[in-house]
Amino acid sequence: MAVLGGGLIGLVTAWCAARRGLRTTVVDPAPGGGAAQVAAGMLAAVTELHYGEETLLALNLASAERYPSFIAELEEASGRDTGYRACGTLTVAFDSDDRAQLRDLHALHLRLGLDSQWLTGRECRRLEPMLAPSVRGGLRADGDHQVDPRRLSAALLRACERAGVAFRRATAVRLRAGGGRAAGVALDDGTELAAGQTVLALGSWSGQLAGVPADAVPPVRPVKGQVLRLRMPEPGRGPAGPFLSRTVRAVVRGHPVYLVPRDSGELVIGATSEELGWDTTVTAGGVYELLRDAHELVPGVTELPLAESTAGLRPASPDNAPLLGPTSLPGLHLATGHFRNGVLLAPVTGDALGELLATGELPERARPFTPERLRAPEDRQERQERQERQERQEQPV
Ligand code: GLY
């Protein structure tokens, strides 16, 4: 079994496959890299809910619920800490427009039975004293936590090694097919890897692999995000309490901004959202906008040392939901297109792909996310008929 891509999603897939006894190889020149090196690691099933994404919400909630047991299993298997923090999230509003929007979101949360509580501006500041005095109100979501994606990746890498996953440090350049199914992959070092099952987990690059039949190519595009890392004061050196005790977010003049405080003292500020193809330049404008908006939210941020600025690519799909499971080419599966939720969806992705690879069956909760959903209805019908003919061993008419 081959997993193409050793980012977070590739590693979790490989680990879950290996735990189920499958001989697994990850193909990646630098496993443990990818978007997880940039991501803030918010597990924001509730606070990142968008209208019309209720199907995705169900998967996001399932993964958020799975997180604590997943982390316990992973930390045990790897011997590494992942920086998981059950801290909750506060989303605040500054002006009457923000407040009205946030009120609508709160109403949607309540309709869907989500854990979300409306707070006045004063209550928000009581919870997070570093917030600007201009905060007018906010939503408290005590179930939206965080994990450190860099530590999570490192733990997954270690757990994979301990579970016997092999690593081919090369780039997959062409899918090999034979007998009407995926048969492995050709690598840029001139070698080939044969595999009965292949998982495409190349993040934003998942649609770029040569040799994939046109109707199996995942429609994934890169969406750039710039992210900053600052250092908060050590306890006892700054204001009386912690600088921030939970994730704080807002939409400032139409730009979403979030601040994610880690136990390590790191404060992650994100993120821009830019449709600029493969560009990963950190720009002065991107850094300026993030700091400007974060400063509006928490004025004290401009006093903190700026440690790092990075940019990564979110693998976006046409409906913002991941692509999980079989393609039109037997033996080729997808684990990609996670867009804004790659870190959140890592546990359910691993569980779903592990089960699919081991049993041939995708678990019920992952079925709405097969690539099949994005095909035109007539293509779906034609494919279904073709499959039925194959099953009856009939020749096409
Ligand atoms: N989920 C946060 C982001 O994509 O920026």
Image: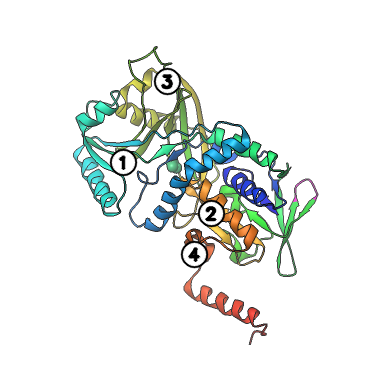
Q: Amino acid at mark 2?
A: Val
How far apart marks 4 and 3 lie (CA) works out to 44 Å
- Front disc: 4 or 1: 4
In terms of sequence position, does the residue under pointer 4 or pointer 1 come before the other?
A: 1
Dot 4 alpha-carbon crowd within 10 angstroms: few under 14, some 14 to 19, many 20 or more? some
How far apart marks 1 and 2 lie (CA) works out to 25 Å
Q: Amino acid at mark 4?
A: Leu
In terms of sequence position, does the residue under pointer 3 or pointer 2 come before the other?
A: 2
In terms of sequence position, does the residue under pointer 1 or pointer 2 come before the other?
A: 2
In terms of sequence position, does the residue under pointer 4 or pointer 3 come before the other?
A: 3
Number of marks in the rendered image: 4
- Residue 220: numbered disc: 2
- Residue 254: numbered disc: 1
In terms of sequence position, does the residue under pointer 4 or pointer 2 come before the other?
A: 2
How far apart marks 4 and 2 lie (CA) works out to 12 Å
> In the figure, is residue 340 to the left or right of 360?
left
Residue 93 percent coordinates (x, y): 25, 37
Residue 130: quadrant of the picture: top left
